[in-house]
Amino acid sequence: MDYTILSIAPIFLAPFTAFVINAFFGKKLPRQGDWVSVLGIGIAFLFAFRIFIDFYSTYSTEYYIHKYFTWFDLSYGENLFKIDLGIYIDNMGAIMLLMVTGVAFFIHLFSTWYMWGDVRYGKFFTLMSLFTSGMLGLVLSDNLLSMFIFWEIMGFCSYSLIGFYFEKEKAGYASIKAFMTTRVGDVFFLLGILAIWHTVGNVSLPDIYAAIANGSFEGHTVIGISLATFAGFCIFCGTIGKSAQFPLQVWLPDAMMGPTPCSALIHAATMVAAGVYLSLRMYPLMVAGGLTPFIAMIGGITAFGAATIALIQTDLKAVLAYSTISQLGYMVLGVGVGAYNAAFMHLITHAVFKACLFLSAGSVIHSVHTQEMPEMGGLRHKLKFTWIAMWCCTLAISGVPFFSGFVSKDRILGDALYVALHAGQGFTYMIPAALGFIGAFLTPFYMCRMMFLTFHGKPRDQHVYDHCHAEHLKINQNVPLLILSIFTLGVFFSGSLTGQGFVKIFGSKNEWFKVLVASPTESLDKFAYYTREELGWSDTNEKEKPEHSEYEHQSGFAGPNHENHEGLHHAHVEGAFGSIIIVACSIFFAFLMYIRRSIDPARFVNMFSVWVKALKNKYYFDHLYIDVIIQKGLLKFNNALAWFDMGIYDRFAIDGWEAVSRVGYKSSNWFDRIVVDKIGVDGTAVATNIFNIVLRLIQSGKIQTYFIVLIFMLVTFVAVLT
Amino acid sequence: MSGILNLILWLPVVGMIGVLVTPKGKDQLVRYISLGATALTFIVTILLYLRFDESNPNVQQVFQVPWIEQFHINYALGIDGISLPMILLTGLLFFICILSSWTITKSVKAYFALLLMLESSVFGVFMSLDFFLFYVYWEVMLLPMFFLIGIWGGENREYAAVKFFLYTFFGSIVMLVGIIALYYATGKGPDSFSILALQGGHFTDMTVNVFGTDFSFEKLFFWSMFLGFAIKVPIFPFHTWLPHAHVQAPTAVSVILAGVLLKMGTYGFLRIAFPIFPSAAVEYSTAIAILGVISVIYGAFCAMAQNDVKKLVAYSSVSHMGFVMMGLAAMTIQGMNGAVLQMFNHGTSTAMMFLMIGVIYERSHHRWIVRPDGTKGYGGIAAHLPRYTVVFIIGMFASLGLPGLSGFISEALIFLGIYQRFTTITVIAVLGLLIGAAYLLWMYKRMFFGEPSDEVKSYSDMNAREVFYMVPLCIAVIVFGVYPAPILNIMKSSVGQLVELMAQFQ
Amino acid sequence: MISLVSYLAISLLLFFIGLTLMIARKNIVAILLGIELILNAAALNFVAYSRFAASNIDGHIFSLFVIVIAAAEAAVGLAIVIHYFQLKETIHIDEATELRN
Amino acid sequence: MKLALLANISFYIPELIAILTMCSLLFFEAAYSDEERKRTFVYIVGLIGLAVCMIMLVANLGTEPKSLFAKAVVIDNFSTSMKMIMVLGTLGTFYISYKSNDIYESLKSEYLVMAVGVLVGGMLLASANNMLTLYLGVETLSILSYVMTSMKRKDSLSTEAGMKYALYGGITAGVMLFGISHLYGIFGSIHFAEIAAAIPALEGAKLTAAIVAFLLFFVGLGYKVAAFPFHMWSPDVYQGSPIPVTAFFSIVPKLAGIAAIVRVSTTLFGGDSSMSLTWIAFLKVTAIMTMTVGNISALNQESVKRMLAFSSIGHVGMLLMGVIVMNEMGTNAILYYALIYMFMTLTAFLVTCLVSNRYGSDKMVYFRGLVNEHPLMAISFTIILFSLAGVPPFGGFIAKFNIISAAIDSKLYTISFIAAINSVIALYYYLRLAKTMILDPSDGKDQLRGASFVSHLVVAGLTIPVILLGIFWGKIYHLYSFAKLYIDS
């Protein structure tokens, strides 16, 4: 298929144009311009779908689109420097585009119901459009710089949306927290970009892949660390910030201060997905830098830690927020253990079901006007469609067979199990894998807990229950939920009903996801002879594979070894069975606890009281960051510094010159009066007495002081000069 | 020979004379005359841009007549890619400042006359090709600033005005010694005051005797120039005049001070200190980079502690100009271009910030985020003043360096440039981005979030005039953030030439 | 035979006596006297040098001028002192300290 | 021979006219009885006399330099230019004295007589070519100055100042004379040219004696220009004197003294003998100390007059810097500096005089908010203050620029840096006054008495040359480049 700018750019430009139109004319348009935004994302979806179909039909891992243009060129003489921006779409990008546009479309559609009547209805859609276009721009980007640009634009949008209700002080704190926490990661990301740029001379993805393939990274160090490690670490820090990984996870739970659809967008399709997407894009670098154990560890800790916090949350959205962090942990764990494909699949599947979950939660919250689960209960009678959709998603996230979560998450866990036990990597991956499995037990539990508390049982707050209107099928309320919940079925991703290759449905393209999304490490050699072409829109879609590839996997390759396919498959089967058992136990446990009420949760609370207290305080991270580091450290330091600057430095060192001169003046006066008058004159008087007894003892006379000085100076000069 | 530079230079003076001869009591006429003069000047600067040959790295539109023949001092004007962006910025900002000063009622005639005089002298600095002329304009600029701060400023205006004047004068008089020394070092020839002819590192091997010790001529006078320009920029540790001057100055003067005057310092480095003393500049680039990074971090930390919003932005200027210094110290094509671009971008974004503070100050007559007694100053503005909020956000995020707005690309270029030479410094400097975001957002949070107090509810939103003068800046901030090529194209040849020169001495 | 050295010694003595008077005495008239002594020391030098060292009469002429000027200076000085005495009724030098910061 | 001496007199007409003016002033003073009309008339006579003197000086300007009266005086372009500046300065102080209450209340024409007398002494000093004329010049300047100082007869301060001046002047003149007498003994001559010829041959004890003698000799000159360490009289005297007198003292005796120092230095120490090096080193220290002490002392003065007095010490330091250079650039720079300095000082003292007339004091507080009542005057004064500090585009900057240029041309970097720093210190106290006038609110004061429209015009008119000479200084500098110092050998 022949691509021109017109066939790709609308994916980004349509929502962006919607943003521009709404920003300037939103208030004058009918319905404050919400339809512009929906239309924009709809158009983007159509274009993305077209591209996806093209890639799907081509069905080749070698296939990619790379087009770029010069943003600006600073070359002069022999100093060459230009920045190219461009589009790079490979299979992963195509799938990602489809997911983002699709999910975002439904979120937009849902928002027209959810946000209707809000004071700043139009502004909401304006920001949502920008947000989506930012994410789409990031996915389309062919280089790290423009990725960073869109990455930051998303940061801004999330900031604005989290602080959307700016009358609330809390929203202000939450928005700053989100922006600043992610900014910590962003700063490192930028540093990583700089490091790569300096070495490679460019930051476009093909160039970076080529540089890794050609070993250009070797031999360089940055402040004592090997370049690949440094750059990889910095870029992964970007992921940590954006994808709310340990230890920068604190912002995401607070992000629910924003309207619920925006949470859906942040948690599912955009913001947090961008972090994992970046790690996946830069996977070869992480591997080259030997960072995979570290990444796996971060992922494991996050997956486990967030899941434990989710256990005790009573706020509907908070449970979902922590589940997001936990699931992102799984994705990062997937990256760490080399489950590249599975991690990406989990990104996609998670986006779908998490979007659906949040929209459902939005539907519930909008109906009952509370977010507290203890006030809900029994809502399944009133919110039928929401209930169905939400259960689908819960099963998906729990990893129940036939649902998408099972396909993706269990492959991650399978890979983790494999690298931990079979791949001969020692104990490196043991802890992350173990944490992942514990998390896999906790996930169904807290999700089911949420479902049971919200929809099942008897209404706990009759007032709330009575106020809730029974729901009807509405095109912009529950239809998006239902459509999204269809895609929580695993079959779309695995091609087979169970996800392990049994009951194939898609025929020859059965394992399409697995086949198409190939790890760049495995296909790095296609970039080994990559060279940049002349400026302008490059027409090349498909790169010829070099005839004789001299590239081979470097020896001592630090990434998890997946060579043993037999063992891998074996581990997957083990993992799958293991996790099915775990999930079953977990759901049963939740059932006992919250439906049958045969186990009292309070018992566990008492048993682990210290831990529960830690959980309630979110493991004290907020305390550490805000109270200790910022309040006690940073602000105090700042105040001290500012005081030093104006109170000490400026006053004494700068204004001090004035004081010094004044002192100089005074002391010269003093010199006149004391030294010259008293010592000089009186001393001379004494001397005169000795030589001439006739003269009596005299006192100083002012004019005579001058004479003394005069003579004194003369004598001095004579003494010095002769 | 071209008269267009003369036109730009003297149009404000004509306006000033017009203002001065206006009969007493016709304040409105005074305002319109100044507006007309600055608008016309701005239009001519745009014409100048249209006439500019971007591919030519050398000085263009040269106008030269002898001034003092014995000393070979010329009235020589010319522009190149480094000065043109500054001239465009100056033209724009002064036009805006006249509009923003519409509400001034104290000695209107004198105010506008001084403002126009200031404009002319700023143009003079950016256009001079003769060192003597440059110095004269450099100093002349102090006079209107002194009075503008001292008469129309805040409570502590006199202290600030005197401090500003003395501090800058100190720097420039040391520079003067350097200027004269250069004149004699070149043998009093016909080109001895020509900035262009002095460039290229002719002074590497000379020595001078000061205080009984032999110094390298190049190094000594590099530092003497450095002092003059560094105070103007200002870099740590010469920055303390800035918060005083900014806080006390009236809005328009703050805008000019931050938007244009600080750039004169970095412009001095680009036009004078670096090309004339290249080997010293290269040798001391590490020191400059370190001072730059200290400014970045120090300014940002100090900004975070401020409760006076104008002081906060003033410290942010210290921080942002630190980036420019780092870009200069990089001496690479990215860093230098980034620095010049940052000069322009900081000019627009910080001008926006100061103008916005001025707008709110006109309504509230205070600038406290948190008052000294601990009570809340502003708060909840967002809920009450939507238009104001939007413009403020644009300005704030531009100065925060949000991609898509102008600040980002220049900072990124600076980082790219400096990373190649000083990796460790870069690693520290990126923290500045973090703190930079922190203090601005913290300020924004405290000013805009929450329920508006009764006091805030009494403010009116931006009126048509205020919106009108903010629009060009918003456009500049957004357009050059998305597509910086027009500005970069102006400067790249000239900057490239400078980088090549510096490279010869590395 | 009186040599040049003798004249110089005398004049030096006169000079220092004059200086001492100016420094040590607190009567303004005495200080004026000191000035006269210094001038006379110089005049003596001129004459002596003219006689012994130089081969011209410039020294003599100079000393004549010195005498005239010394007279003028003494006249003006005394006039001012008298006026001062009229105003302040003292010629004590230590009391002339109004001019101070 | 005798006729030839008489023929020389045609070149000495300016001085003669000045003396004639002095005499006619005395004559008209005695002839008229109507006090008010006499006053005006006397001023007109003085004005005409000095104007003619000025014209004669201008006529002399182009002529060949020559020495007159058996080489006792030299008429060259340098001395003529210096004299012109002194005459202009004297004229200016006439106007100040006309306006000043200090003079007006107690006196009639004495000021004019005395001022012209000092001017004659200054002119003599400026062209002195041997020790005798130099001494006569110094004494003529001094003795009349004592009288001028104590001119406020009812004021004990004025009298005290005069007395101190007389005593200090007496001792310094005596010391100087003592030095000269020894110089005469060492060199056997009082003529500069002959001394200069003998200097390189000095050695041993004679050299030491010569150095001591020259030092003693310098005391007289240093005291006249108020150079450190012989400056201590000047603040007291300036404070005690009536304002016109202070203004006059800041201009004429100083410039005459500088002219004499320039001539002595250039004529006697032009070579590079060890004597010359000692002399220059001594001057260097003196210059540095003079400007530093002057400027630092001026910092915290509350009395504007006293501040200006100290600042004039600072300016003398700058002028001495021009002397150290010992070449044509230096003399040109000094001439230029002197011209600008004359205008600046006149304006500053005129404004001070007008303010002090109204309030009976020249304390800085009385200048508060001057701009509100008298914008023209305040703005002019501010310009003058900036010019004094050396801020472009005013003449004072060019003056400093030229001096520092000359210094750097001779590789005197240290002193140049010190001069630069001194400018900053100076700016500080000038700014204080400018701030008081322009930035501070006024206290609802009345109109200044005597501050007529004409006074305003005069103030503004004196400011205009300061501005013009700051921008179009090429021509005047060109003119001064002909003002070479004539060394008669």
Image (cartoon, coloured by chain):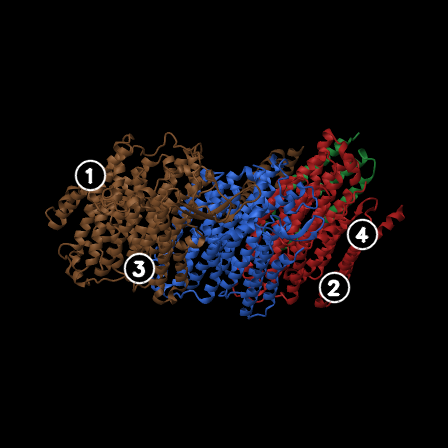
Chain colours: A brown, B blue, C green, D red
Q: Residue at (29%, 65%) from the top-left corner?
A: A117
Mark 2 and mark 3: Cα distance apart in space = 99 Å
Circle 1 packing at 10 Å, graded few (<14), some (14-19), many (20+), is some
Q: Residue at (27%, 40%) from the top-left corner?
A: A412
Mark 4 and mark 1: Cα distance apart in space = 115 Å
- Indicate the position of residue D83 as horizontal and vertical percent values: 75, 52
Confirm whether residue A113 shows in the render: yes
To which quarter of the image does residue A685 belong?
top right
Between disc 4 and disc 2, the foreground one is 4
To which quarter of the image does residue A496 belong?
top left
D151 w.r.t. D213: above or below: below
Q: Residue furthest front?
A: A508
Q: Which one is nearer the viewer's eye here, B446 or A607? A: A607
Q: Which residue is mark 3?
A: A109
Q: Are marks 2 and 1 in contact (CB under 8 Å)?
A: no
Q: What label does residue A163 carry, if any? A: none
Q: Amino acid at mark 3?
A: Leu
Between disc 3 and disc 4, the foreground one is 3
- Pointer 2 indicates a residue of which chain? D
B52 w.r.t. A412: above or below: below
Q: Which one is nearer the viewer's eye here, D439 or A369? A: A369
- Pointer 1 indicates a residue of which chain? A
Q: What label does residue D62 carry, if any? A: 4
Q: What label does residue D44 carry, if any? A: 2
